[in-house]
Image (cartoon, grey):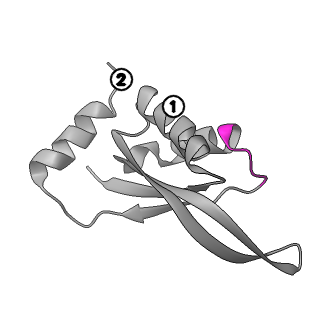
Amino acid sequence: MEFLFAYITAPDAEEARRLGKILVAERLAACVNILPSMESHYWWNGKMESAHEAVLIAKTRAGLRDELLERVRALHPAERPCVVFLPLASGDPDYLAWIAAETEAP
């Protein structure tokens, strides 16, 4: 079984918490970590923008990638939310088994 980190940005920590709780409640992620504050600089519609955002890191199975992406798109307030997936090359087998178990339907 393959596992991923989903790196997701949100406009603030409150929104990251809301998204994270839904992803865990719906078993699309076993766990989420929220980094409440970061500064972003990026191009949007031809001009340089800056914003303070929050980061959400969701731990999930690779088989849930598309479903998690679609759920974040449906819930996120941004027109084009940052959702990227990072493959986990390895990890503590017991921890990975926990992710697998917690992302299965009850």
Q: Residue at x 58, y 42 (%)?
A: 14
Q: Where does residue 93 sit, x and y in percent of width and height? A: 11, 51
Residue in the picture at 44% in, 36% down: 28
Give the labeled residue for mark 2.
105
Spot occupied by residue 1 in the image (x, y as percentages of width and height):
25, 49
**Front residue (pair 51, 7):** 51
Mark 2 neighbour class, 10 Å CA radius: few under 14, some 14 to 19, many 20 or more: few
Query: Predominant secondary structure in magenta?
Result: loop
Magenta region includes residue 76: yes
Q: Mark 1 Cα within 10 Å, few/some/many (few <14, many 20+)?
A: some
Q: Is residue 86 left or right of residue 15?
A: left
Image: 46 above or below 5: below
Could you tell me which secondary element the residue under label 1 belongs to?
helix
Report the label total.
2
Position above or below: 30 against 90: above
x and y percentages locating residue 77 in the rendered image? 74, 45
- What residue range appears in magenta? 75-79
Q: Give the CA separation, mark 1 to mark 2.
A: 14 Å
- Residue nearer the viewer, 78 or 4: 78
Q: How far across and down, in percent of the image, does residue 88 sit?
A: 30, 63
Residues 53 and 47: in front is 53
Q: Quadrant of the C terminus?
A: top left
The type of residue carrying mark 2 is Ala
Q: Is residue 56 left or right of residue 51?
A: left
Q: Is residue 43 above or below residue 104?
A: below
Q: Which residue is mark 1?
A: 22
The residue located at (72%, 77%) in the rendering is 42
21 vs 90, left or right, is right
Q: Secondary structure at mark 2?
A: loop
Camera-side residue: 2 or 94? 94
Sequence-earlier tag: 1 or 2 = 1
Q: Amino acid at mark 1?
A: Ile
